[in-house]
Image: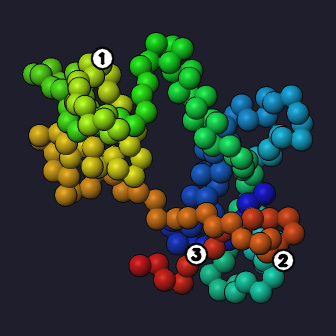
């Protein structure tokens, strides 16, 4: 289980966190359809201030209103999951490639019709026609959007997460914890 304290601030209050917990449970409604009951995850829940502080010995009580507990899974082989998605897409008719970089878009008056690409191993450039183009460039999504003539790559379209998950030695015997940095700049 994961544990975070709740606070009075709007972005960290019990009502907002409870809503997030319900959304997480709703979006992962099928998570317990696995045959192995050892892999089932309980729904998230709120706990009292006293219960939160009892689970976080040494934590300052200043501003804490309670806590939130939720359950998450750990992915041991993310690259295998990605490969599975790629192979499934190929089986469904998608064309897949590796070591290919988008260098532009193919457009007409109706919209985007594909991409201009380069094979980064050979330097060969080529066009890829498509009924649908998905920008799945992750942290480089704005760079790819910047390749459109009508977009400026200097103004971010997407604001990326500034949180991190840091895995350390086990601090608490039963919980992973989430805490705020003192420097929120």
Cα distance in 3D space between marks 3 and 2: 18 Å
Return the residue at label 1: 131
In the rendered image, residue 136, in percent from the top left (x then y), is placed at: 40, 38
Nearest the viewer among 86 and 156 is: 86
In the rendered image, residue 10, in percent from the top left (x then y), is placed at: 50, 67
Q: Is residue 64 visible?
A: yes
Q: Nearer the viewer, mark 1 or mark 2?
A: 1
Crowd class of label 2 (few under 14; some 14 to 19; many from 20; radius 10 Å): few
Label 3 or label 2, whichever comes before in sequence order: 2
Return the residue at label 2: 54
Above/below status of 91 relative to 30: above
Q: Quadrant of the C terminus?
A: bottom left
In the rendered image, residue 31, in percent from the top left (x then y), is placed at: 73, 35
Horizontal arrangement in the rendering, residue 180 relative to residue 50 (left or right) = left
Helix, strand or loop for disc 3: loop
Helix, strand or loop for disc 1: loop
């Amino acid at each position: 289980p994961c544990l975070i304290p709740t606070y009075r601030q709007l972005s960290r209050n019990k009502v907002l966190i409870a809503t997030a917990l319900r959304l997480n449970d709703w979006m992962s409604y099928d998570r317990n359809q696995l045959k192995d009951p050892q892999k089932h995850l309980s729904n998230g829940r709120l706990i009292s201030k006293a219960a939160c502080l009892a689970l976080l010995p040494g934590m300052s009580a200043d501003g804490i209103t309670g806590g939130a507990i939720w359950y998450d899974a750990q992915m041991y082989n993310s690259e295998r999951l990605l490969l599975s998605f790629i192979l499934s897409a190929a089986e469904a008719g998608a064309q897949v490639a590796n070591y290919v970089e988008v260098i532009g878009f193919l457009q007409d008056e109706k919209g985007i019709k594909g991409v201009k690409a380069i094979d980064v191993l050979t330097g060969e450039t080529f066009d890829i026609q498509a009924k649908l183009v998905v920008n799945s460039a992750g942290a480089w999504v704005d760079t790819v959007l910047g390749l459109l003539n009508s977009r400026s790559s200097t103004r971010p379209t997407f604001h990326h997460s500034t949180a991190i998950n840091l895995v350390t030695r086990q601090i608490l015997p039963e919980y992973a914890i989430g805490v705020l940095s003192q420097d929120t700049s």
